[in-house]
Amino acid sequence: MKFLTNLLGMAVAGTLGYLAEPKLRFDLTGVPASVVVKSDVVVADATSGVKMTIAAGSRVSLVRIDGANAIVSPGGINVIGSIPIGETDLVTQIGARPAAPDTPPSAAAPGLAVGGDSQEPAATPEPPPMPEPAPTPAPVATAAPVAAPEPEAAPPSAPEPLPAPEPIALPMPESIPAAAPVAAPAAGSTDVVEVMKQSIQAAQIKEFTFDQVLDWKPEADEIVDGESYQTGLASYKAETIFGVKTIQAKALIKGGKVHRWIWPKSGMDIK
């Protein structure tokens, strides 16, 4: 019976420690248990390698501090990601932590002298004499400002007559050549949408499948790492820890095929 009582007490203590751990850790170490991310962060499952994106403004668990980066997790112990500390509210939380109040010094009751077996009222010191008020200084008379003499206005001078302009011989306008017609794009140019579809159907990346895509859209050409690419966006639905979200992926196309899939905001590669 005593063994069962001890076992029950250990279980209750462990549960209370688990519930109180985030607050105790913040009070004792100054490091909060969770932070709010200010930009999207990619986390990955260390076991399966599956990646997901946590949207900006989400609250996540703070696993540890690694240099200038915060290692965060949406909840799973094996699902973690790295984000710069400046992209979280960690500094704000630590700065808002209240300082520990000072311990007031112990003192004897006012008016009592401590000593021996009895306490007698201590002699109250006489207050120092009040200083005599300083005499009020007499106001100093200020001299009235002397107005500066106004400058005499110079008499207006008569304007000199302007010389008559000489006639200017204008050249005869030459005929303007007609603008050369803009060449239409050559037949068989790269179809951005078709190239993106072929890449997803061929499972070039594993982040999403062809059936998840909601919209295909070509975008303007871009220069990435000194290379010029045609670009396009694929919008797809994915299940996240915050429910079903619509996510975008950008394709960098050159030579009629997708060279890389990247996240539009961070520019990181999509696997």
Image (tube, rainbow, N blue to C red):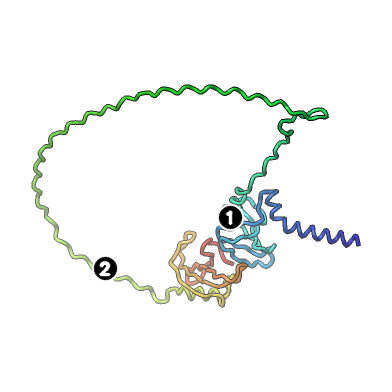
Identity, as a three-letter code, of the amino acid under mark 2 = Ala
Q: Is residue 176 visible?
A: yes
Report x, y in % for residue 111. 72, 30
Q: Residue at x 68, y 40 (%)?
A: 102
Question: Residue 88's mark?
Answer: 1
**Horizontal placement of 35 versus 156: left or right?**
right
Residue 95 vertical placement versus 60 (above, below): above
Tag count: 2
Q: Is residue 206 visible?
A: no
Callout 1: few (<14), some (14-19), or many (20+) C-alpha neighbours within 10 Å?
many
Q: Residue at x 67, y 43 (%)?
A: 101
Report x, y in % for residue 197. 52, 75
Callout 2: few (<14), some (14-19), or many (20+) C-alpha neighbours within 10 Å?
few
Question: Residue 170's mark?
Answer: none
Is label 1 in a helix, a strand or a loop?
A: loop
Is label 2 in a helix, a strand or a loop?
A: loop
**Horizontal placement of 178 versus 228: left or right?**
left
Report x, y in % for residue 45. 66, 65
Question: Residue 179's mark?
Answer: 2
Q: Residue at x 44, y 66 (%)?
A: 221
Residue 184 vertical placement versus 267 (above, below): below
**Horizontal placement of 152 versus 202: left or right?**
left
Identity, as a three-letter code, of the amino acid under mark 1 = Thr
Q: Quadrant of residue 163?
A: top left
Q: CA distance from mark 1 to mark 2?
A: 56 Å
Which part of the image, by quadrant, shows the N terminus?
bottom right
